[in-house]
């Protein structure tokens, strides 16, 4: 249950942090699109701590990424080309939006979280949520 609640927070934070990315990680979405190794740091929107995220590069046809999370957590992803490009486009859209809203619901029966988002009043699909749901991205460092 704790891990599920953490994932809800994580998905919401990914939306919020992507708005902050323009300050220090504005090149991240473009570098992700081509899976070009890249590292940057940004101020976490909830803790205020400086955290980093990196594109490690391609291995076995997957683009490997890692991102620090609060309290010694880490999100690791292995994106195929389709997801890599979808996440890149999503981050570009969110970064360019003037008004980004996110809401999350949690189904206690299934343990699944569902986040809905809008950018400038238009609904958007968050490919990161699907990546976590499918195990393409995984969180470590929490019990």
Image (cartoon, rainbow, N blue to C red):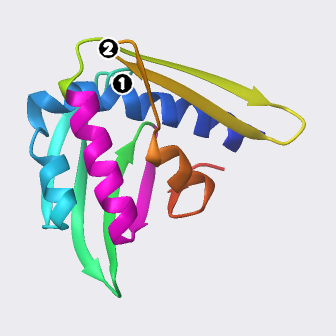
Give the residue displayed 14% in from the left and 55% down from the top.
39
> Which numbered circle lies on residue 120?
2
Give the residue displayed 35% in from the left and 88% down from the top.
60
Q: Say whether residue 88 is magenta.
A: yes
Q: Looking at the magenta stretch, what is its main secondary structure?
A: helix
**Considering only order in the chain, which callout, 2 or 1, is on the residue closer to the N terminus?**
1
Can residue 69 be seen here?
A: yes
Give the residue displayed 24% in from the left and 20% down from the top.
97
Of residues 51 and 25, the one nearer the viewer is 25
Q: Quadrant of residue 44?
A: top left
Q: Position of residue 74 (x, y in %)?
A: 43, 52
Question: What residue span does the magenta drawing correspond to?
Answer: 71-95
Q: Position of residue 46 (x, y in %)?
A: 39, 20
Q: CA distance from mark 1 to mark 2?
A: 14 Å
124 on left or right of 53: right
Q: Position of residue 81 (x, y in %)?
A: 33, 70
107 on left or right of 22: right
Find the residue positioned furthest to the front: 122
Find the residue positioned furthest to the bottom: 60
Q: Position of residue 11 (x, y in %)?
A: 50, 36
Q: Say whether residue 46 is magenta.
A: no
Q: Residues within 10 Å of mark 2 (few under 14, many from 20)?
A: some
> Which numbered circle lies on residue 16?
1
Disc 2 is placed on an element classified as: loop
Tell which tag, 1 or 2, sits nearer the viewer: 2
| Looking at the image, residue 17 lies above or below residue 83 | above
Locate the N terminus by quadrant. Answer: top right
Of residues 121 and 143, the one nearer the viewer is 121
């Amino acid at each position: 249950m704790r891990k599920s609640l953490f994932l809800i927070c994580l998905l919401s934070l990914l939306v919020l942090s992507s708005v902050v990315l323009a300050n220090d990680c504005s090149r991240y979405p473009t570098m992700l699109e081509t899976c070009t190794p890249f590292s940057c740091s940004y101020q976490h929107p909830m803790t205020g701590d400086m955290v980093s995220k990196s594109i490690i590069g391609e291995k076995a046809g997957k683009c490997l990424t890692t991102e620090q999370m609060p309290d010694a957590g880490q999100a690791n992803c292995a994106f195929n080309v389709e997801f890599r490009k979808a996440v890149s486009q999503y981050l570009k859209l969110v970064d360019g939006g003037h008004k980004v809203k996110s809401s999350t619901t949690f189904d206690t029966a299934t343990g699944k979280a569902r986040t809905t988002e809008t950018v400038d009043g238009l609904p958007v699909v968050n490919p990161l949520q699907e990546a976590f749901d499918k195990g393409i991205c995984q969180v470590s460092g929490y019990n």
